[in-house]
Image: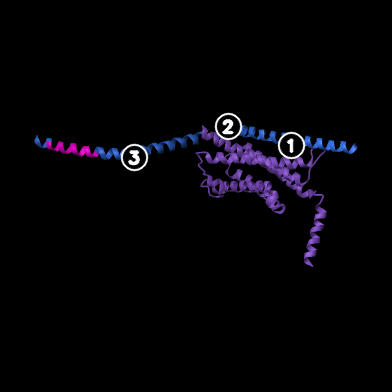
Amino acid sequence: MNDSETVQSKISARDRAQRLMNRLTAGIALGAVAGVGALGYVSAATIPGSTSSSATSSTSSTSASSTTPSSSSSSGLQASSGSVSASSSSGVAVSGGS
Amino acid sequence: MTDQLLWYTTRAAGAVSLVLLTAVVILGVLSALRFKTAGWPGFLTTGLHRNLALVTLVFLALHIVTAVVDPFTHLGWLSAIVPFSSYYRTFWLGLGTIAFELLAAIVVTSLLREYVGHATWRVIHWLTYAAWPIGVVHGLGTGTDAWSPWFFTLTLVCVAAVGFAVAYRLVAGSRDPLAAPRASFRSGVERKSEQ
């Protein structure tokens, strides 16, 4: 009877410790999630990096937009230069007449 | 805004990983010392050590994934796997990759402990003592917040805590109740093999 009580108390102590371990693990994991939020806020407040970030994004968008005109301007230039040479030849003919 | 959120998450998850890893190392030292009290049985230290190691890996994964997918840094997945392959702060980032891979090796061999054998597991587990300082140096070398007062204080507290635990471990020696019989058995085996 006495041995049985000892065993039971050991079992309940082990269960208590097991529950404590689960609670501690869950608590630390939740605390770590909250820590990411809190430290993220602190890091944003200390080194926001908004200037360099926005400058870089605007630079990349500028370079992207400069690529587009260069590809379109190459085809546009060729077409317009052809028509200019055609009109200049007719202009020479007019000036020669006067 | 999203890019900045990724950047803040990378930095915060790195700091939280350092704290968690520090706790894992201290709990490892405590379990080596077979620490227990009336309300804190020995298996609680070992179990918490194992659980927190897994939680640490989750936050390290968050740290790495947010750094890799951040379009501002565009580090690439290769730099997360192959050490010293990053164009950005090659050496410091490479240390982070090594620390993560050491931890991954420790966790994987711990989960497969019965297959790899105790001796192999024990040797690999000693790598924790290398992974932690490598992680600290990585944070100081490449971290945006490395010299910010809050992060520097956090790092100092972590270094002091682990330093104290390791020093105590060295001074206290082994609390393994089977240490003496095991040592005499080993010396007996060695004597027999010499004959």
Chain identifier of the residue bearing label 1 in the image: A
Q: Main secondary structure of the magenta part?
A: helix
Chain A: give its colour: blue
User: Which tag is nearer the camera, tag 1 or tag 2?
Assistant: 1
* Residue B64 inside the magenta-drawn segment: no
Mark 3 belongs to which subunit?
A
**Where residue A10 sits in the image (x, y, percent)?**
83, 38
Which color is chain B depicted in?
purple
Quadrant hosting residue A38: top right
CA gap, disc 1 and disc 2? 35 Å
Q: At label 3, which amino acid type do we have?
A: Ser
Task: Identify the mark nearer the N-term, 2 or 3.
Answer: 2
User: Which residue position is annotated with label 2?
Assistant: A45
Q: Nearer the viewer, residue A46 or B176?
A: B176
Where is residue A21? Give x, y as percent: 74, 36
Q: CA distance from mark 1 to mark 3?
A: 64 Å
The residue sitting at the right extreme is A2
Which residue was labeled with disc 3? A71
Residue B166's disc number: none
Q: Mark 2 or mark 3: which is in front? A: 3
The part of the chain drawn in magenta is A81-93
Task: Quickly name the residue at label 1.
Answer: A21
Label 2's element? helix
The amino acid type of the residue labelled 1 equals Met
Colour scheme shown: by chain
Whichever of labels 1 and 3 marks the residue nearer the N terminus, that label is 1
Tally the marks: 3
